[in-house]
Image (cartoon, rainbow, N blue to C red):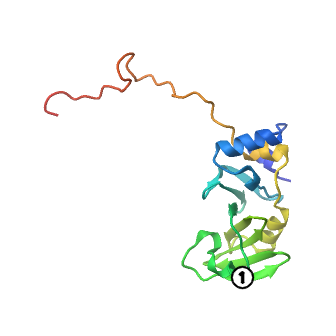
Amino acid sequence: MASVASAAGAEGESLTPDELESRAKAMGTAPELVHVMRLPEYTLARQSVGVIGDDGFSATYVAEPPAMIRLSVERGSMTEDTCRDQPVGDMSGERTTCEPDAGMWYRAGGGRHEYALPKNGYVVRLSAEAAPVTRAVLRAAARSVHRPDGAEAAATLPTPRPATTPVPRGDLPPNGDGAPDNSVGIGG
């Protein structure tokens, strides 16, 4: 069974709630919006983890043969009245269909489909291309979404960059204003 931890190579590491909060904030994401999914055949593409919108969270999970599920969490809401107005998987300009499914919204449009899970003040979305990812797989992904435990958080959230500013450079002069001398002389 592929797991988030094994996909990221961080086995044994576990974050405390304070460390999760620190890592999430360092990347610009609200800690409460960090979620993960767990499906045996899908692994986290660690390089895909990032911020979406103002302070949302986004991650992509991949499987073989090539298939991807994008998990995104943003502030807002989704109701029966607004479901069709919001594009599926950020594909604006496409017609969106919506149907309720076990407390979630199944949405389709533009060759993509997704499950949207409205929460208290935010919406978790799992979207994919319709061809390689079946509705059943997408539903299973949606049902597996949860807030990460310490090990899942360690495997998902990037380690903050060290606070070594400015980055040491070997091309700066030892005195003056610190800018490299790129002059070309008179005339050009």
| Residue 91 placement: quadrant | bottom right
Q: Position of residue 140 (x, y in %)?
A: 83, 68
Q: In this view, does 108 lie to the left or right of 36?
A: left
Q: Residue furthest front?
A: 121
Does residue 22 lie above or below 53 as drawn? above
**Residue type indicated by callout 1:** Cys
Label 1 sits on a secondary structure element that is: strand
Q: Nearer the viewer, residue 181 or 64?
A: 181
- Using the rendered image of the protein, determine whether residue 68 is visible from the camera's viewpoint: no
Q: Which residue lies furthest to the left in this view?
A: 187
Residue at 74% over, 71% down: 116
Q: Would you name the residue on which mark 1 appears?
A: 98
Does residue 137 lie above or below 171 as drawn? below
Q: Nearer the viewer, residue 21 or 188?
A: 21
Does residue 187 lie above or below 118 as drawn? above
Q: How many labels does the image show?
A: 1
Q: In this view, does 45 lie to the left or right of 100?
A: left
Residue at 83% over, 39% down: 16
| Residue 73 placement: quadrant | bottom right
Residue at 60% over, 59% down: 53
Q: Residue furthest top?
A: 174
| Residue 83 placement: quadrant | bottom right
Q: Position of residue 110 (x, y in %)?
A: 60, 78
Q: Position of residue 30 (x, y in %)?
A: 70, 51
Q: Where is residue 22 in the image (x, y as percent from the top left)?
A: 72, 40
Quarter holding the C terminus is: top left
- Using the rendered image of the protein, determine whether residue 156 is visible from the camera's viewpoint: yes
Q: In this view, does 33 lie to the left or right of 148?
A: left
Residues packed near mark 1 inside 10 Å, few (<14), some (14 to 19) or many (20 plus): many
